[in-house]
Image: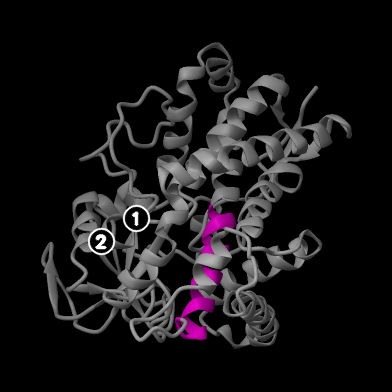
């Protein structure tokens, strides 16, 4: 089949082509990118690939190009060691401690919406600032740098999915220098015995290798940047996608107004129906034969979360957005060793946001679906015009 994730049709709606991928081409080869890559789409195959890290490796990155292993986007033991450094920042206890900060910021942003015009862009007024301010605070970034911080995050994502990332090198170099200075300043404070905040930056900056030295700067910096991107890009898209779907059919929004027990279901169904990350890549370490097709050793494989989430073998009526869908595991945060470490925070922020919006902006309505974000392997709204009265 001729499915192409870069086509206008699929960019406009990534669900286009899922039926064919799932029913007739479960192992697809795409030649529209350099290097070419294969795609796995069926839920069972995606599940197997995400769990089998020996066959489907991350040692050359989780993007479409072969790259050096950095940070947590690599195989064990490096991945496990680096992930363990930051794991404590995303435990249920840590999320409980963070909740009041998220709630306060949520209401502050809604105050700003209510003080402005009746029509507003939900992305700019709420979905962008909420997660970026939270993760920036955890990383000790000054509030005056938030706009630059968000811009650099966008650059990182664009470079990851680009066939030719060289166009982003200059801005990436500025970002790397900023983050390195940020990291070293905190390390100097730690080494000097000065009091430092008990935050995520301190966890990373103060981490020690087995020999007692600080973790190498390159590894620590890559962890910080992965947390930055994961901590705001996906949550922003989760919230814009969720509000878009809930408001495009006013009956859905009304159902939530009448039954708040559906809030958690709304978050999970949004994640299933519109995953903020459509898929990530692995590299085959040996030939793999599936459904009569052999994937060679040493090629990139797109593990298609979005298609797996629409697999009728797993989900009844998968192309329907259903707030009362029986709960089943979706693939939107990945699975296994590389499951998104920030998933608990994304869920918490989205649920707090939805409750507050229902409380304080009950008459929200959709003006238009707005525009999508640019990176082809991500899915969210860059603009989402709404009205609150």
Residue 342 visible in rendering: no
Mark 2 lies on a secondary structure that is helix
Q: Main secondary structure of the magenta part?
A: helix
Extreme-front residue of the structure: 193
Q: Residues within 10 Å of mark 1 (few under 14, many from 20)?
A: many
Q: Position of residue 293 (x, y in %)?
A: 15, 70
Above or below residue 230? Residue 315 is above
Q: Which residue is mark 2?
A: 50
Measured from the top left, where is residue 102 in percent x and y? 63, 40
Asked if the residue under mark 1 is in contact with the one under mark 2, i.e. CB atoms within 8 Å, the reply is yes
Q: Quadrant of residue 183?
A: bottom right
Residue 256 makes an appearance in the image? yes
| 190 vs 265, nearest the viewer | 190
Location of residue 304 with respect to 209 vertically, above or below:
above
Residue under the image location 30 percent in, 50 percent down: 308
Q: Which residue is mark 1?
A: 334
Residue 225 in magenta stretch: yes
The extreme top residue here reads: 258
* The magenta segment: 215-234
Q: Earlier in the sequence, mark 2 or mark 1?
A: 2
**Image position of 93 (left or right of 359):** left
Residue furthest right as drawn? 116
Task: Answer with the quarter of the image where residue 46 lies.
Answer: bottom left
Query: Looking at the image, is 356 positioned above or below residue 382?
Result: above
Q: Is residue 381 left or right of residue 312?
A: right
Q: Which mark is residue 357?
A: none
Crowding near pointer 2: few (<14 within 10 Å), some, many (20+)?
A: many
Asked whether residue 61 is drawn in magenta, I would say: no
Query: Which residue shows up at 66% across the image and 56% down it?
Result: 137
Q: Quadrant of the C terminus?
A: top right
């Amino acid at each position: 089949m001729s499915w192409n994730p870069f086509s206008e049709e699929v960019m406009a709606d990534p669900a286009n082509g899922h039926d064919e991928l799932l029913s007739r081409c479960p192992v697809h080869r795409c030649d529209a990118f350099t290097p070419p890559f294969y795609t796995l789409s069926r839920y069972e195959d995606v599940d197997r690939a995400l769990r089998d890290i020996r066959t489907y490796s991350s040692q050359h990155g989780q993007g479409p190009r072969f790259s050096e292993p950095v940070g947590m986007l690599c195989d064990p033991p490096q991945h496990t060691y680096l992930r363990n450094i930051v794991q404590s920042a995303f435990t249920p206890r840590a999320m409980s401690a963070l909740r009041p900060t998220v709630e306060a910021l949520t209401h502050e942003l809604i105050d700003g919406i209510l003080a402005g015009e009746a029509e507003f862009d939900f992305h700019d007024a709420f979905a962008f600032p909420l997660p970026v301010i939270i993760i920036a605070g955890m990383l000790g970034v000054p509030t005056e740098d938030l706009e630059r911080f968000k811009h650099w995050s966008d650059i990182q994502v664009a470079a990851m999915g680009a066939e030719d990332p060289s166009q982003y090198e200059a801005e990436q170099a500025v970002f790397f220098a900023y983050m390195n200075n940020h990291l070293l300043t905190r390390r100097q404070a730690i080494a000097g015995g000065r009091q430092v905040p008990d935050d995520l930056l301190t966890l990373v900056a103060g981490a020690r290798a087995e020999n007692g030295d600080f973790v190498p700067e390159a590894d620590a910096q890559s962890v910080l940047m992965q947390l930055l991107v994961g901590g705001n890009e996906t949550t922003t898209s989760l919230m814009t996608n969720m509000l878009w779907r809930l408001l495009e059919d006013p009956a859905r929004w009304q159902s939530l107004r009448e039954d708040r027990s559906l809030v958690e279901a709304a978050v999970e169904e949004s994640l299933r129906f519109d995953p903020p990350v459509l898929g990530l890549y692995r590299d085959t370490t040996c030939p793999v034969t599936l459904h009569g097709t052999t994937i060679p050793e040493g090629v990139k494989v797109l593990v298609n979360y979005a298609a797996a989430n629409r697999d009728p073998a797993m989900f009844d009526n998968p192309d329907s957005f259903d707030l009362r869908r029986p709960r089943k595991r979706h693939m939107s945060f990945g699975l296994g060793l590389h499951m998104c470490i920030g998933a608990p925070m994304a869920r918490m922020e989205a649920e707090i946001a939805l409750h507050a919006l229902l409380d304080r902006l009950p008459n929200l309505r959709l003006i238009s679906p707005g525009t999508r974000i640019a990176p082809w392997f991500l899915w969210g709204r860059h603009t989402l015009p709404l009205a609150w009265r």
